Image (cartoon, rainbow, N blue to C red):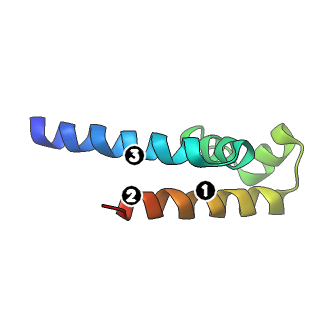
Amino acid sequence: SPEQAAIGRAELQTVRAALLELPERSRQVFVLARFEGLTYAAIARRLDISESSVQKHLAKAVQHVMRRMRAP
């Protein structure tokens, strides 16, 4: 429905804004994991960081995005 499409666009805009607020590395990890579907190991290799760093960046990014999605 048009209403659902409008809500979806608003949510997408909120996610985009939240991602832009993140540090570059956290944003990269989030995009690679959530949008490109890469594994932690693949992200670690691509960004030349440890898998534990990937986990920390992703946790930070997800927490931030979720907090922004709940904000009025």
Residue 41: image location, x then y, percent: 80, 51
From the viewer's side, name the closer residue of 48 and 41: 48
Pointer 2: what residue? 69
Q: Earlier in the sequence, mark 3 or mark 2?
A: 3
Q: CA distance from mark 3 to mark 2?
A: 7 Å
In the image: residue 38, left or right of residue 4: right
Q: Is residue 56 left or right of residue 2?
A: right
Labelled disc at residue 61: 1
At x 36%, y 64%, the residue is 70
Q: Amino acid at mark 1?
A: Ala
Mark 3, Cα crowd under 10 Å, few <14 / some 14-19 / many 20+, is some
Say which amino acid is labelled 3: Thr
Tell me the residue that label 3 is attached to: 14
Considering the image in quadrants, where does the N terminus appear? Answer: top left
Asked where in the image residue 56 lies, by quadrant, the reply is bottom right
- CA separation, marks 3 and 1? 14 Å
Secondary element under disc 1, as helix, strand or loop, is helix
